[in-house]
Image: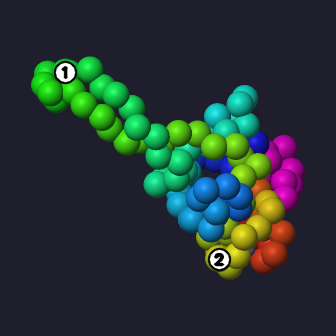
Amino acid sequence: MRIKKGDKVRVISGEYKGVEGNVLKSFPKLGKVIVEKVNFVKKHQRPTQQNPSGGVVEMEAPINVSNVQLICPKCGKPSKPRIKILEDKSRVRYCAKCGDMI
Ligand SMILES: [Zn+2]
């Protein structure tokens, strides 16, 4: 999984093409991510104590990770992160464009 929570991404296909946002949640096993303000769906909620009338709320639904592209926080360009293994065996991602760790 090359995209994780907190990453800034751009949607590259579908209805939300071109929209940029932060990853709110990632689902590595499903290959999906939830991106802020992308792919809103309406959900009906039962009345609760906090919200006695219930109603409809809009919230983001997961989209395929293949539909988004990571934006490098350093150079601000869409980037395919590369993985590098350090001497202590930890894995880091780095930007293929500017070489900075992401
Ligand atoms: Zn970069």
Residue under the image location 13 percent in, 25 percent down? 52
Q: Which-is-in-front pick, marks 2 and 1?
A: 1
Q: Which mark is residue 22?
A: none
> Vertically, is 68 above or below 60?
below
Within 10 angstroms of label 2, few (less than 14), some, or many (20 or more) residues? few
Task: State the extent of the magenta-drawn residues as a range.
Answer: 82-92
Mark 1: amino acid? Thr
User: Is 102 or 44 nearer to us in this picture?
Assistant: 44
- Image quadrant where residue 45 sits: top left
Question: Going from the N terminus, do you reach mark 2 or mark 1 first?
Answer: 1
Q: Which residue: 76% across, 67% down?
A: 79
Q: Which residue is mark 1?
A: 48
Most foreground residue, 72 or 63: 63
Quick check: 99 above or below 12?
below
Asked whether mark 2 lies closer than 8 Å to ligand 1, one says yes
Q: Is residue 77 magenta?
A: no
- Whether residue 2 is visible to the viewer of this picture, yes or no, is no
Disc 1 crowd, CA 10 A, few/some/many (<14, 14-19, 20+): few
Which amino acid does the dot numbered 2 rest on?
Gly
- Residue labelled with disc 2: 76
Question: In x, y percent, where is residue 87?
Answer: 86, 51
Residue 98 drawn above or below residue 39: below
